[in-house]
Image: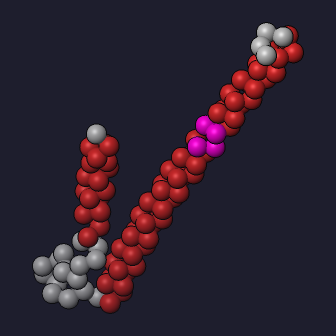
């Protein structure tokens, strides 16, 4: 089931990234003018690379957040386990003090 939960995210990412592929192509969108001006080509490539960098940054932030959350959960679980062990240790000492156990 874990693989199926990542499928919608993958599909969304592929659909989203497909929208920006046209920004990287050198094919003119205007059939009347066979060549693009240099400023338009440079602007298109700059915009495309900027979008690509932003997408990679967002993915990196998402992954970093995910791993930090998992690390926080692990630490929290360890703290709760330590508290549970301490609770049982205190009960054992109480039983010894009351003479309920040898």
**Residue at the image point whose x is 58% and y is 49% from the top:** 71
Give the image quarter of residue 48: bottom left
Query: Can residue 29 be seen in this snapshot?
Result: yes
Q: Is residue 42 left or right of residue 83?
A: left
Query: Can residue 47 be seen in this snapshot?
Result: no
Foreground of the two, 23 or 10: 10
Give coordinates of residue 44: x percent, y percent.
Answer: 34, 78
Foreground of the two, 70 or 82: 82
Give the image quarter of residue 78: top right
The answer to whether residue 91 is above or below residue 57 is above
Q: Residue furthest left?
A: 31
* Stretch in magenta: 74-78
The answer to whether residue 82 is above or below residue 50 is above
Give the image quarter of residue 87: top right
Give coordinates of residue 21: x percent, y percent.
Answer: 26, 70
Q: Is residue 28 left or right of residue 24?
A: left
């Amino acid at each position: 089931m874990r693989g199926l939960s990542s499928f919608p995210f993958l599909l969304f990412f592929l659909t989203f990234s497909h929208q920006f592929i046209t920004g990287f192509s050198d094919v003119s969108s205007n059939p009347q003018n066979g060549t693009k001006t240099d400023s338009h080509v440079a602007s298109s490539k700059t915009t495309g690379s900027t979008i690509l960098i932003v997408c990679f940054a967002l993915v990196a932030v998402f992954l970093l957040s995910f791993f930090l959350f998992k690390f926080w959960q692990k630490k929290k679980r360890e703290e709760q386990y330590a508290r549970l062990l301490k609770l049982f240790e205190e009960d054992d000492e109480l039983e010894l003090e009351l003479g309920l156990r040898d």
